[in-house]
Image (tube, rainbow, N blue to C red):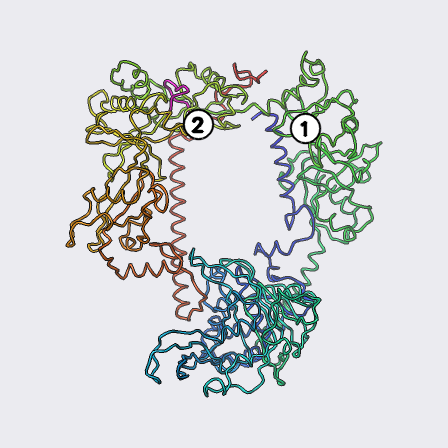
Amino acid sequence: MIPGLQSALLSRKKYVEEASNVTIGSGAGSGRTDLNGLIASGSSKFALLQGGLDKSETGFTGLVNQGATCYLNSLLQTLFMVPEFRAAMYDWRYDPGLHGEPERCLTLQLQRLFARLQTSARAAVTTGALTKSFGWSSSDAFVQQDVQECMSVIFNYLQTQALADHISSCHEGRWMDYLRCLNCGNPRGREEAFRDLQLDVKGMSTLEESLRAFSQGEELEGVSCDACNGRHNHTKGLALISLPHILTLQLKRFDLDYTTFQRVKLNDRIAIPPFLDMRPFVRSDENDGGQGGDPSPLEYELLAVLCHVGSAMAGHYFAYIRDLEGDRWLNFNDASVTELSSERLHGVLCTTEPQEATPEDSKEAGPASAPASSQTASSSATKPHLASSNAYMLVYRRKRPENASTVDQARIPPDIVEQIAAENAEFHALRAEWEEERKWLNITVHHDGAGRGLRVHEDRTVADLTTEALEAFQAPSKTTGPSSPPSGLEGLPLDRVRLRLFDSLKNILMAPLGDPQSRLKDLPDDALRRPLRFEVRDEDGEFEEYLKDGLPLSVLLFDAQTKEFATPLPLAVPASGTVSDLRATACKKLRLDPGDLHLVHFAGSAEPHPLTDESQPLVDLGLSAGDTVHAEVAGEASSAGDEGKPEGASWPLVRYLDSLVHMITIYFTEPEDPAAAAPPVPPPAAAGPLAELLDKMAPHEVAAPSQRARRSVQVDVRNPLARLKEAIGQDLGLGLEEFKVRRTEGGIELKDLDLPVAAYGLEEGMAVHIKLGKPMVPGEWQFNVKLVPSVDAKVVPLGPHVLQEDLTVREIKVALHQALASTGGGESPVSPMPAPDHMRLRQAAGTGLPGGIKLGAVMPDDKRLCDIFGERIMDGKFIAIQPTAGDEHFTDEHMLLRVRCWSPQAQVLGPMDEVAVRRAAPTSELREVLLSSQLLPPTERGPPASEHLSVVKPFGYLLKDLANLPLLKWKPQPREDVPISEGTLRLKDGDLVVFKDSREEEVLSEEVLDKQKQAATGGLAGLSAPVEQGFVIYTEEQQREREAKLKVEEVERKQEADQRLAQIMEGLAKQRGETGGGAPSGTGGGHGGDVAGCTPVE
């Protein structure tokens, strides 16, 4: 890094850090203490104000979302707004002897929550105590559940807590699950209770249409009838007998896509009537075969719409609920409760017409009302149905004269009333304290790269703030103490300074803070949210005129001697100004003559642009607020231009900025001392054109760990790689042909010396690895060679080897055999090493596992390396050697497949083998090849024919468990007329094929049957479907077991973390011991920009 730039960046970094560190409270530049920040930190007493300060204007209380509990909040608010349910909750009484510990009693916590919703002074209350009574841990609150399942589980629990009568009488109806013979009319069935009706939305346009579909039932063929002693068609369905007072309708918006076995959400719009007559959908005495009926009126009014937005996997719940007492609709969205106007209600629910609904309207519309999509607002026949694509659960309430619209809070148990009164008193006291706290402002003031944080009351004036800030800068800093450098404000009177708004990140001076006598609370809010900065005027001068529509910039003054930049100097010029205006403003600030200042526009990675055209508009330079312009004081050296170069090209600042763009520092470690390393073993003698290749294929030395010095050189990225090698070689005393340059120790060699350094991706501060030895040249490639003794044997690595791209595969076999068959002493690394005539070379690829490779196509002997790989050739590719029984003559028309035979009856998966087959072969030819492989075990039925074989291409990991084999896609089999490289199989070199005799039946064990069930629920064959945890309320015993388990897991996690920390510390201590306790030098042996061959290109 160039010292000047490093100093400037460090100064800027320190400046921004100080701008953040001195801030009090919210972390913004200035402003009032932020409530949300303190609540989120959990370290403030004001965290008790969670949910907000101001209660909703509706008078209702929201519920805080614990993470993903919006479904629970929507349900709780709906139940709270049902007067009958709320009254039943208030009338219940807690008995410690019957109901256990208070913290684990769901009914008690729900009762307290409802009381808080009705009487709390808070804007929102938490459901933490309720979910704790469920036995949940903190992570359970971040799992979204289904609201209908949640209601069912909660009602099941409440039925055990003396609320069974209320739930059965108010929330349960009765239906008949019937089967009726269409020949004789004889009905049979059983009566059951229900709490909700699940209605289809797919293909339905109105709620009545969905209810009719629910009531119609389905026809079954050939069912035995005892009454008429025959098999006849029957109708099966659910007949509604009696309806609950609170009717819950769930719209089935979640379905299973049977093509992908994934859940999907149906966003079909369905018209929702505000008033619903259920009489047409309940069986009467005349049409239910004497099953009974309900003669009372069956008119219902809509009470709540629970909505779900999102997908089948994630989304958000909220509820539109009618306030019966105020006769209005409210939007309950977690902690927020807002009122919906009539227009807004019809807007959010997509109504067909914004008009008030009446029971008469509902009767006239009837169950056969037209779909919302087919109606228009101008139609006089249009009726007020609410058509929603997000409605998920509807709650209707039966219209009865005795219906209550509210619940008197006198029904709340007295002890809960007292508890909430105490909570409200604490809340009001805390709120009063918070309101007083908010009157204190946290102000950050900057000057000359330093900052001070002040805490000032809002009733103070701007002059008071200026005085306190001046005194803060004149006093020693709290961080540096008495040794802090002078601030430059010592002894200045108040009339020579003023405070201005300041953007510390862009270094922009903005508007003055305000009139000195203005009180801080009367200033605009924007002025209290920004940091401030001192502006100092000359003793005989005036404050700089603030340009409201000006362009604020910063000027960085360059010192050509020290190669460093001064502190950024903020200034402002007219937005429509020119380079001349910018120069005049900067010179006035710097007290220079206009001719003594050079200006340069430098935008990071772009070329520096000297500003020599005084009439050039600033907007043409692309300057925006906060941008930086570089400057230098003109001198004799910079005033003399270079002949033939543009004006300004010889300025020291321009040359320096140009070096910043293109000059980089590259680090390297000096190579291992050859005298200290074991001498390399000479390769066997070779004659002919392979001699040089064999020399490069000698075993690579592995550098032992040593304390080698870290060095660095600087290079222009536009120069060729040869310049970098020359600089490194000069530093090490080596020639270009004596060492190799790699990105990493075992990485790819940088070999084309004519390519620019930038082409290799080398950037500032990167390191390269130096290795002694003869370097590669273009046309040579390093391949990782592996030996595969057999198709299922462990792969033997043979190290990297350099191959010339114009060699044929036959020549490569000879070269590899000569290089690997002997190591000087006559011992082969692999014994015996196959001869070239018994060697097969194949393309291969890494699998990501240690030592693992995937075999690919066979490399024909007559092909050249460059022809086989083409544009894909690169260093680091794999080549696999396979021993063969004799010389082979593969062509590109054939491929090798791995095959295994599955025996269903014996539950045995045979050994791995390989077969050769034509790429264009049909499936029948593949079966013939497999039949001739002799892999099929003998059976009682005799040898199979080729048409008896079933083939499949499985994922390899599925074969680790034999229970997966029966679940593979054995049917349907691939088409016979489609090549195996296309169609269903799409086979390619090295693929695995499993085949079996289809005459054998699969043995379905219990494990296989379990996997079939898992696959049917959405998982792929052989893979377990993801386990979903439904909504659960744990018993007291289960809660204690979970708590004990969590404590054990917490102890284990802590122990594991301590062990990892100990291992890390041990490794660091070992590393310090190996390096002698000293850190490696960052620039030892490095050179500056005058290294030969590393100067900027001309």
Amino acid type at mark 1? Ala
Q: Quadrant of the N terminus?
A: top right
Residue 752 drawn at (x, y percent): 45, 20
Disc 1 element? loop
Image: 1044 above or below 154: above
605 sits to left or right of 263: right
Question: Does dot 2 land on a helix, a strand or a loop?
Answer: loop
Residue assigned mark 1: 566
Q: In this rendering, would 1005 be left or right of 536?
A: left
Q: Within 10 Å of the Cα at label 1, are there few (<14), some (14-19), or many (20+) other Cα atoms?
A: some
Circle 2 is placed at which residue position? 743
Q: Residues within 10 Å of mark 2 (few under 14, many from 20)?
A: some
> Is any atom of residue 753 visible in this view?
yes
State the residue at coordinates (63%, 43%). Answer: 20
- Residue 524 within the segment the image draws in magenta: no
Q: Quadrant of residue 838?
A: top left
